[in-house]
Image (cartoon, rainbow, N blue to C red):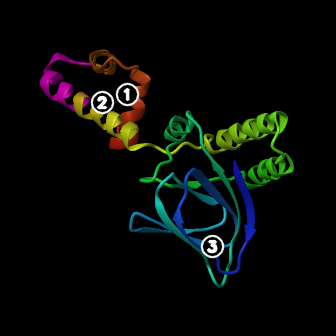
Amino acid sequence: FILGYCMAMVFLQRGIMAVHCSAVELNGKGIFQIREKTYHLETGQGFLIEPDELTFYQSDAQEPWEYLWIGFNGKMIPEFLKQIGLSSAHPIFHCDKKKELYWLVNDMLAHSKSNFSSDLRRTGLLYEFLSILALNPLESDQQVDSEYMYINQAIEYIKNNYWDGIHIYDIAKYLCIDRSYLYLLFHKYLKQS
């Protein structure tokens, strides 16, 4: 674990990290750059830096940020981040529970001794940190692609079978999905039921 809390007037960071790093802005503004893309961050937003990614971030000169950060690694971390929807392609998240995250990182810092008990405590707190981020998972490209696939297959089925007096449960059965889920997809992407 690498942990920190920072209050910066103008803080610049450019480099490559060996671990995953997540930063959450408690107050202020700043920018985050990755893969030639710039994100303008405000209070309550955070960003992910994956290992071996070149990034740059800087505090705003008029409204400097106050942020906390945590570096972590592990065998299951890529899967957890994928479930939350975070990656180098989608590194920005919003969190309404910045106070809870602050206290978790504070608790991690209080248990920074290198012993088995402290290691377990920090690991548990990391899981709590990630669980808070998971409360509002971001849609991954893979999830959106599979949803579009269902929509396209449903539309194709309707085009090929409209004269047979089909119902939503016929389409759902054809797609092997629940009809409530199909209804939600149509409402979400086509604004129709």
Disc sitting over residue 169 in the figure: none
Label 3, label 1: how many angstroms apart (C-alpha)?
40 Å
Rendered view: 88 above or below 162: below
Relative depth, front residue between 27 and 18? 18
Instruction: Please identify the quadrant where the C terminus is shown.
Output: top left
Q: Amino acid at mark 1?
A: Leu
Q: Amino acid at mark 3?
A: Lys
Report how many numbered discs are placed on residues in the image: 3
- Is residue 159 part of the magenta span, yes or no? yes
Residue identified by numbered label 1 = 182
Q: Position of residue 19 (x, y in %)?
A: 57, 50
Which mark lies nearer to you, 2 or 1?
2
Element at label 1: helix
Crowd rating for badge 1 (residues with CA inside 10 Å; few <14, some 14–19, many 20+) = many
- Is residue 124 part of the magenta span, yes or no? no
Disc sitting over residue 150 in the figure: 2
Looking at this rendering, what residue extends furthest in the right direction?
Answer: 110
Q: Reading the chain from its start, which is encountered first: label 3 or label 1?
A: 3
